[in-house]
Image (cartoon, rainbow, N blue to C red):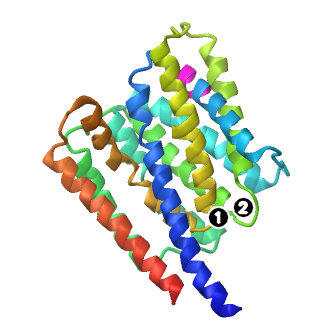
Amino acid sequence: MNELISHRQPRELRLGILAMVATAFLWSIAGLFIKVIDWNPFAIAGARSLISSLVVLAWLRRPRFHWSPAQVGAALTQAMTMLLFVSANKTTTAANAILLQYVGPVFTAIIGAWLLKERARWEHWLAFAFVGAGMVLLFMDKLGGGRLLGNVLALLSGLVFSFYYIFMRMQKDGSPLESILLAHWLTAAIGLGVALFLPCPVLTWKAAGAIAMLGIFQVGAAAILFSYAIKRITAISANLVAVIEPVFNPLWVFLALRERPGVHAIVGGAIIIAAVTGASIISARRAAT
């Protein structure tokens, strides 16, 4: 029996890592589709979350809400992350917002060791250093001074996002997807509520199609994959794998606009992928032994 469990653990770990990679891949299409929607950010966030909540609800069929601190905490922190990130993008450069948000893995390592007793290994800390260097290279041509308020909001977004991973990981023996459902209901209510006091968005077939893609795939399908992943890999590993999300952005820009990424973007992306892959392989081998 013990031998069966030992063989199953690394397999589950690999599946969790693959699910997290797929999650990051879906998250990365946000920028591509948001660009074609001429709406205010709150209308986009609210409509996207409303559609994604229907996807998650259809998957769950009968959601179970037990209102535990972990379930409520994950819902609140995800909603706060989405709203803070939107606000940060409006008050600082997009590159600054992304870069500062992805200090999350370090926060997760520190807080996770305290709350989850999942301490970061040496390969994680080494990967953090290489990911940081890769991020700077990836956005070297786009980094700017921005505004202090926007940079602070982006940093807060990263901190709150790290708590989201931890609260979701606390539900590894249950169903964390209900937290995501609650988060999207909350985000939809706030986003659409604020949008009522802003200029009415113009509904076109292009905008409707883009919102549908965001709600169904970029957030809805990603939520299902993420809930699968977080039950199988640690919060630190999940957050670390998620940093490959910005690496996909130049790919989408190239496919859609035929705009070739610069040398810095290619080298930075390669460093990030190598760091995340290396840390994941080492963690998987440790689980196998």
- Residue 40 is covered by the magenta coloring: no
Q: Amino acid at mark 1?
A: Lys
Of 220 and 88, nearer the camera is 220
Of 214 and 74, nearer the camera is 214
Question: Which of the two marks, 1 or 2, is nearer to us in this view?
Answer: 1
Classify residue 260 by image quadrant. Answer: top left
Q: Judge whether 32 appears above or below 119 on screen.
A: above
SS of the residue under disc 1 = loop
**Residue at position x 63%, y 55% in the image:** 227
Classify residue 143 by image quadrant. Answer: top left
Whole-percent x and y of residue 225?
58, 53
Residue annotated with mark 1: 231
SS of the residue under disc 2 = loop
Residue annotated with mark 2: 171
Q: Give the residues in magenta.
A: 41-46
Q: Relative to residue 10, is residue 50 drawn left or right?
A: right
Q: Is residue 149 visible?
A: no
Badge 1, how many Cα within 10 Å: few under 14, some, many 20+?
A: many
Q: Is residue 79 visible?
A: yes
Of 5 and 65, nearer the camera is 5
Q: Which secondary structure class fits the magenta region best?
A: helix
Contact flag, marks 1 and 2 (Cβ < 8 Å): yes
**Residue at position x 57%, y 68% in the image:** 234
**Residue at position x 58%, y 85% in the image:** 7
* Measured Cα–Cα span from mark 1 to mark 2: 7 Å
